[in-house]
Amino acid sequence: MTRHEENREDGTRGGRRPGRRVLKAAGLALAAALVLGAGAASWAYRHLDGNIRSVDIDSALGDNRPARALTTSAPTGSASASPLPTGAVNILVLGSDSRSGAANKALGGGDSGGARSDTAMVVHIDAGRTGATVVSIPRDTLVTRPSCPLSSGGSTAVAYGAMFNTAYAVGGPVCAVKTVESLTGVRMDHYIEVDFAGFAELVDALGGVTVTTDEDIDDDDSHLHLAAGTHHLDGEQALALARTRHGIGDGSDLGRIGLQQHLVKALLAQISSTDLLTSPAKLYGVADAVTGSLTTDTGLDSLGELTRLGESLRDLSTEHLTTVTMPVVTAPSDPNRVVADEPEASALWESLR
């Protein structure tokens, strides 16, 4: 058993706590349409469904990829309903700094032409879907970026010693997925991208999120200034927390990753504890923010598919969610960059296959 596997079984796997569902938000979109009433439900469903953007990653990458995990299904309780999947699944989740559009520019500036993956997490959901591991990949990691197909035709050149987050810049979601699969040897079954404005809108739709910081944060770049302690943040402040790096620790990306992982758990706890079904307007606002912030692969590009994913995770709680960072060491070629720390990094990825 690896050290990573030991951490995943540290004391919290036994008990099931109803109501603390990790991906409850995926099913909220469908519930929103239902509670709005028969007259508005059809319009609401079409609107929420139309919010979701998608990229056909499977067609772009073809068959030259790591093997898929074996999938199984569990009965849904209805003879007419398709069984819900129960097999292990890996999802690449990116936070993009494309900042295109007025709302995104207001939160960071820039345009989509220089977009990079500001945050990268591989979400591994265990077989049985009662436990999950989130692995953060530092954006400053130096990798071999593989040749990636371009939507305009042709392909990018192989790049050695490239920063990990440049994959998205040169080839979008397709190249980001291919680079992660090349780095990890793990098949990404799905892709989810969240933009700046969408994340901030989701936090605001939930009424904010409560976090506790262990140290003062003073970062003029992200415009975040917080004293150590517990704070209730609005969407813009939560986004600043996810992006800050210069006001904590040694100013590296590793400190920011720790904040991001803490924020993810706090946000999931907020979703789980909020009784949205008693407020149709708030429920619809959350569903609109969730679907409007997403770009997915074509396997998750509908309200029905997202709801089905959420239903398959109904027994997954925040207590069974482990967050780790890919083991890294300072790059010999650049003290401001890191490289995978072997063999620990390979052992981690092997445990997720």
Image (cartoon, rainbow, N blue to C red):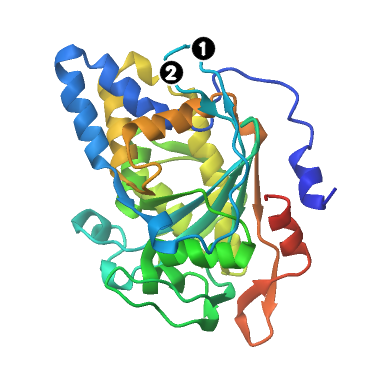
Position in image of residue 184 (x %, y %): 63, 62
Position in image of residue 322 (x %, y %): 66, 42
Label 1 neighbour load within 10 Å: few <14, some 14-19, many 20+: few
Furthest-bottom residue in view? 333
SS category of the residue bearing label 1: loop
Q: Amino acid at mark 2?
A: Ala
Label 2 neighbour load within 10 Å: few <14, some 14-19, many 20+: few
In the rendered image, the vertical position of residue 344 relative to residue 170, given as above or below: above
Residue located beneath label 2 in the image? 81
Position in image of residue 43 (x %, y %): 16, 26
In the rendered image, the vertical position of residue 202 relative to residue 175, given as above or below: above
Position in image of residue 95 (x %, y %): 42, 56
Q: Amino acid at mark 1?
A: Gly
Q: Tell me what residue is drawn at x 52 percent, y 80 percent.
A: 162
Q: Quadrant of residue 253?
A: bottom right
Furthest-front residue in view? 63
Left or right: residue 128 versus residue 159 is: right
Left or right: residue 334 versus residue 116 is: right
Residue located beneath label 1 in the image? 77
Could you say which is closer to the camera, residue 258 or residue 134? 134
Q: Tell me what residue is drawn at x 20 percent, y 33 percent.
A: 47
Residue 222 visible in the shown view = no
Q: Tell me what residue is drawn at x 43 percent, y 18 percent.
A: 81
Check contact, mark 1 vs mark 2: CB within 8 A. Answer: yes
Tell me the CA gap for discs 1 and 2: 8 Å
Could you say which is closer to the camera, residue 75 or residue 190? 75
